[in-house]
C-alpha cells in the first residue's frame, strides 16, 4: 500500500504546501517510510494565521461556550472510537510501545472531556471597589494561539496546549514536530471529520520549525505562543515573542531527581524508577534521569536497577512484549551515544552503554538501557538533559545533602521523594525547586492538575484551570453608580 501523504489543514480545507514539496516520515524501529507530510513555507503559515484570525472574529466560537463544549464532547467520542487505530500509528511514527501509545490516547480523551466542562467556566469576578463604583473583571480569549510542539508525545503535547486555548475561545494554528507529523496530522483529520469546529478555528501546518515556528512566534496577529521543546529553541521563541509583547508559555527540558531514602519501600520504588527513567526510551521531559540514593542502600539499589535494566525487553514498539522502544532518530541516537562515551571516561558504567545490534535492531535506533554511578555533580552527564535511556545514580548521606543534589541543576520540572517518614516527605517536597513533586510515586499527571517548570524548565502552566486561564486576558469594566 502506498504511504499516505498528509496535507496542511487551513481554513477547513486540506491543501498542499505552496512549495509542492513533501518530506518522509519513518518508523524509528525499522526506518521504513510510513507517510509523508508537507514541507511548507512561510506563505502557508501566514495564510493559516490569517484564516485563524478571521475565524476568531467572524464565528461565535469565542463567545459561545456551549458550541465549544459540544465540539469537545464529539471529539472525545471520536478519539475513543478510533483509539486503537491512532495508537498503532503513534507507535509506528514515534517508536514508543503500544501500551504507552494507548495510555497517551486514553489520557487525551480525559483531557478533552475535562475541558468540555471547563468551557462553561471561564469565570471572571465582580467587585465593589469604592463607594458608587461597581466593577466586573471578565476573561477574554487572546485571539490566535500558536502551538509549537515536540515529537516525544506528539498528541498529548500538541493538544495539552491547543485544547485549553480552544476551550477559552481562541483559534489555534498548530506547528507539529516534523518527525511525528503523521500521527499529529492524522489526529487533525479526525478533528476535521467531527464537523464540530468552525472553519479556520483549528489550522495545522507542517514543515521546518526554524521558518514556520519563528514566523508564528513573530506574527503580530498571534496573541500567544505555547511552546514545548528544547531550552535553546524556547529561548529563541521567547525572544521573538517579545517583539510583539505576546504571551509566551514555555514547557522545556528537565533533569529530574528521584530521591530514595533508606526507609523507602524498594519493592515499589525500584520498578517505578525503571519506568520513570526508561519509558518512551527516556525521551520524556519529566523522566527521572537522576536516582539520588541514601548511602546505606546505594549498593543494593544499584544492583537491583542493574538486574531490572538487563531484563528489560527492548524492541519494536509494535510487539506487545516490548517494554522499551527505539530512540526517535539517528541524530538523537548519536547524541545519546556521545554522552555515553563521555560517561565512560568520567564515571562508572554499571550496565548498558552501547547501541544494540542484531537483526531486530540494525535498521532502527536502539540503545541499551544505561546506568552510571560515580559522576561528579558538575559533570555534563549530571547537569545536561540527555533525552534517551541513560540514568545517573548519585549518593547522599544526609537529608540536606539530598536536597542540595536534587536541586543542583538549572532545571526544575519534576522531582520525587521516597520515604515512609511523613514529616520528611513534606519537608523534602517543600524544599524541591520543581513544578511537580511526587511522594512515593512517579509521573502521575492529571488533566485537573497544573503542570509546568520551575527555574529553566519553563514559564507558565498547562492543564488544570490555570492552563486554560493562561490563554485568556483580563478586562476590567467599571461602572459609576452615582446618581446623575
Ligand atoms: P525542539 O525544540 O527541537 O522542537 C520543538 C518544536 O519546535 C518542533 O515543532 C520544532 O519544529 C520547532 N522548532 C524548531 N526550531 C524552531 C525555531 N527556531 N523557532 C520555533 N520553533 C522551532 O524540541 P524537540 O527535540 O522536538 O523536543 C525535545 C525537547 O522538548 C526536550 O528538551 C524535552 O525536555 C522538551 N519537552 C518538554 C516538555 C515539558 O512539558 N516541559 C514536554 C516534552 C518535551
Image (cartoon, rainbow, N blue to C red):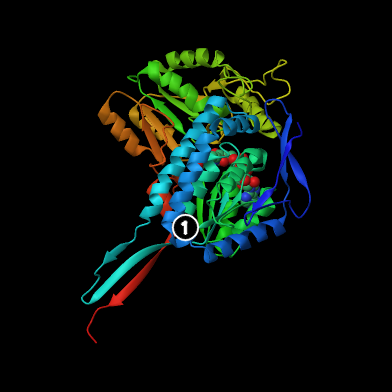
Q: Quadrant of ligand 1?
A: top right
For ligand 1, tell me if the residue under mark 1 lies within 8 Å.
Answer: no
Query: Up-down: is 397 above or below 247?
Result: above
* Residue 390 is at least partly visible in this image: no
Q: Nearer the viewer, residue 406 or 447?
A: 447
Residue 26: where, in percent of width, then height?
A: 71, 33
In the image, 265 versus 30, the foreground residue is 30
Give me the residue at 45% from left, 45% from top: 73
The image quarter containing residue 129 is bottom left
Furthest-left residue in this view: 131
Q: Nearer the viewer, residue 98 or 379?
A: 98
Determine if residue 196 is in view: yes
The residue tagged 1 is 169
Whole-percent x and y of residue 433? Answer: 40, 41
Classed neighbour count for the residue bearing mark 1: other residues with Cα under 10 Å, few (<14), some (14–19), many (≥20): many
Q: In which quadrant will I find the C terminus?
A: bottom left
Amino acid at each position: 500500500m502506498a504511504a499516505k501523504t498528509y496535507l496542511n489543514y487551513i481554513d477547513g480545507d486540506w491543501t498542499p504546501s505552496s512549495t509542492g514539496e513533501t518530506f518522509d516520515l519513518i518508523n524509528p524501529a525499522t526506518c521504513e517510510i510510513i507517510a509523508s507530510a508537507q514541507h511548507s513555507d512561510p506563505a502557508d503559515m501566514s495564510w493559516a494565521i490569517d484564516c485563524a484570525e478571521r475565524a476568531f472574529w467572524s464565528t461565535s466560537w469565542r463567545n459561545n461556550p456551549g458550541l465549544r463544549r459540544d465540539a469537545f464532547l464529539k471529539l472525545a467520542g471520536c478519539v475513543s472510537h478510533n483509539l486503537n487505530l491512532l495508537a498503532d500509528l503513534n507507535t509506528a511514527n514515534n517508536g514508543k510501545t503500544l501500551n504507552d501509545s494507548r495510555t497517551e490516547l486514553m489520557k487525551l480523551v480525559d483531557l478533552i472531556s475535562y475541558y468540555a466542562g471547563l468551557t462553561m467556566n471561564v469565570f471572571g469576578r465582580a467587585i465593589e471597589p469604592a463607594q458608587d463604583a461597581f466593577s466586573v473583571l471578565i476573561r477574554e480569549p487572546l485571539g490566535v494561539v500558536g502551538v509549537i510542539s515536540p515529537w516525544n508525545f506528539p498528541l498529548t503535547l500538541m493538544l495539552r496546549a491547543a485544547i485549553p486555548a480552544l476551550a477559552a475561545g481562541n483559534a489555534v494554528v498548530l506547528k507539529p514536530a516534523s518527525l511525528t507529523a503523521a500521527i499529529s496530522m492524522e489526529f487533525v483529520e479526525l478533528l476535521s471529520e467531527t464537523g464540530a469546529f468552525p472553519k479556520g478555528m483549528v489550522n495545522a501546518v507542517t514543515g521546518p520549525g526554524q521558518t514556520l515556528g519563528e514566523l508564528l512566534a513573530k506574527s503580530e496577529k498571534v496573541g500567544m505562543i505555547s511552546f514545548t521543546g528544547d531550552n535553546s529553541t524556547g529561548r529563541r521563541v521567547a525572544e521573538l515573542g517579545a517583539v510583539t509583547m505576546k504571551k509566551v508559555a514555555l514547557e522545556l527540558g528537565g533533569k529530574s531527581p528521584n530521591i530514595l531514602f533508606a526507609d523507602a519501600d524498594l519493592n515499589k520504588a525500584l520498578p517505578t524508577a525503571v519506568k520513570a527513567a526508561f519509558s518512551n526510551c527516556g525521551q520524556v521531559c519529566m523522566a527521572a534521569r537522576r536516582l539520588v540514593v541514601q548511602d546505606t542502600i546505594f549498593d543494593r539499589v544499584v544492583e537491583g536497577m542493574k538486574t531490572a535494566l538487563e531484563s528489560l525487553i527492548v524492541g519494536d514498539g509494535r510487539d506487545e512484549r516490548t517494554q522499551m522502544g527505539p530512540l526517535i532518530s539517528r541524530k538523537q541516537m548519536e547524541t545519546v551515544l556521545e554522552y555515553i562515551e563521555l560517561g565512560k571516561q568520567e564515571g562508572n558504567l554499571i550496565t548498558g552503554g552501547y547501541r544494540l545490534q542484531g537483526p531486530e535492531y540494525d535498521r532502527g535506533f536502539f540503545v541499551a538501557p544505561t546506568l552510571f554511578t560515580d559522576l561528579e555533580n558538575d559533570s555534563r552527564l549530571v547537569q545536561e538533559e540527555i533525552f534517551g535511556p541513560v540514568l545517573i545514580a548519585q549518593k547522599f548521606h544526609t537529608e540536606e545533602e539530598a536536597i542540595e543534589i536534587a536541586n543542583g541543576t538549572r532545571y526544575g520540572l519534576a522531582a520525587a521523594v521516597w520515604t515512609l517518614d511523613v514529616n520528611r516527605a513534606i519537608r523534602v517536597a517543600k524544599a524541591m525547586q520543581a513544578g511537580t513533586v511526587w511522594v512515593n510515586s512517579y509521573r502521575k499527571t492529571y488533566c485537573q492538575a497544573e503542570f509546568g517548570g520551575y527555574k529553566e524548565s519553563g514559564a507558565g502552566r498547562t492543564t488544570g484551570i490555570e492552563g486554560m486561564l493562561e490563554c485568556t486576558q483580563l478586562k476590567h469594566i467599571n461602572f459609576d453608580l452615582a446618581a446623575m
